[in-house]
Amino acid sequence: MAPVRKIIHVDMDAFYASVEQRDAPELRGKPVVVAWRGARSVVCAASYEARVFGVRSAMPAVRAERLCPEAIFVPPDFARYKAVSQQVRAIFLRHTALVEPLSLDEAYLDVTHSPSNGGIATEIARTIRAQIREETALTASAGIAPNKFLAKVASDWRKPDGQFVIPPTRIDQFLLPLPVNRIPGVGKVMEARLTALGIATVGELRQLPLEQLEAQFGSFGRRLYHRARGIDERPVEPDQPVQSISSEDTFAEDLPLEALEPAIVQLAAKTWQATRKTERIGHTVVLKLKTSQFRIITRSFTPESPPQTLEELRDIALALRARVQLAAGTRYRLVGVGLGGFREPGAVSQPGLFDHLDI
C-alpha cells in the first residue's frame, strides 16, 4: 500500500510588493501597488496595507488608484523578483527534489520521502519558512495536506506568515463547511451558477451526483465532484515548462460578437500579467469563443516576432475577433485570450498563420 502523500504548498506573501518594501525602507507600512500607471495598466501585486482598501492583483490600475488614493505606485522589476524567487527555490531543494513551481511566488513540494526534519511535513514547512525569512527577509505561508488541491487551500488559511495542516483524518471536517468559492476555479460566474442550484458549501456540492455535475458543467463538473470529496491524484511534477497561459470569462448573459471588446481587453491584460511570471516566451496569440449552443471556436495567430507588450497582445486578440465569421445573430457565452507556443528565450520559431474550428 502506497504511503499517504505529504504535499506542501508554499506561497510567498504579497511577493512583488514585499520585495519592494524590503528594498526600500520608506515603503514599509505604506500601501504599495506594483503596477505601471496608465489607463491600460493592471495591478501586478498589492501590499497588505493596500489590500485593506480592496486593491487586488489583476485589477485595473486606475481602479486601484480610486480605491486607494494614497497608494504608492511602483513599476515592476521582474528581474529582481526572479532573482529572489531563485533564492527561495534553492531553499526548497534542500528539503526535496520534487518541487513544482507554479510561478515566481508559489510552488508545490512533495516531501513524502524527504529525510528532512525526520520526515515530518509540518516541521519541514516550518523550517522552510524560517529559512526564507532568515535568508531573504521575506515571509511565506504554507499549507500541508495529502494532495495538491487541499495544500493550496490550506496555504491561504493563515496568511500572511502562517501555516495550516489538513491531516487525512480531518479532510471532511475541514472541507464540508467551506464556501464553494474556496475551490480553485470557482469564480464569481461559477459560484452564481452553483448558487442557482442551491449550492453554497462544499458539503452541499457533495450531494450532487457526478452525472448531474458533468451535464451542468462538462469536464469541470468532474473536477468539482472530486474536489468536493478532497480527491486530487495529480503528482508534483518538477520543472514542467510552461506551454500556454490563458484567461477566460463566462458572461452572465450571452453577448453578440461586437460586444466582446471590453472583455477581450480585460482578459488580454490578465493573460499578459500571468506571462510575466515565467522566463519562457509565448509566440502564438489565441482567441477562444463559446457560442450559446456550446460550440467552441478558436482563432490563432503567430506573428513574426512574439508580442513584446500588452498592447500587441491585445490588438492581435481583437483582430482575431474579426476572423470569426459565424451567422450575424450568433451569441457568445464565453471568451478567452491566451498565449501559447512558449519557448525558451532565444529559441528559433517558425512564424505562421493558422486557425481552426472545434465543433
Image (tube, rainbow, N blue to C red):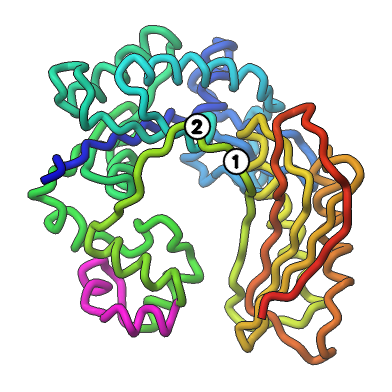
The part of the chain drawn in magenta is 198-217
- How would you rate the neighbour count of disc 2 (Cα within 10 Å): few for under 14, some for 14-19, many for 20 or more? few
Residue at screen point 53% across, 35% down: 103
Asked if residue 319 is positioned above or below residue 281 in the image, the reply reads below
Residue 239 is labelled as 2
Going by the numbered disc 2, the residue's amino acid type is Asp
- How would you rate the neighbour count of disc 1 (Cα within 10 Å): few for under 14, some for 14-19, many for 20 or more? some
Going by the numbered disc 1, the residue's amino acid type is Val
Where on the picture, by quarter, is residue 294?
bottom right
Which secondary structure type mostly characterizes the magenta part of the structure? helix
Q: Secondary structure at mark 1?
A: loop
Query: What residue is shown with label 1?
Result: 242
Where on the picture, by quarter, is residue 255?
bottom right
| Side of 285 relative to 280 (left or right) | right
Camera sees residue 106: no
Q: Position of residue 273 (x, y in %)?
A: 66, 42
Q: Position of residue 172 (x, y in %)?
A: 14, 58
Residue at screen point 19% across, 63% down: 176
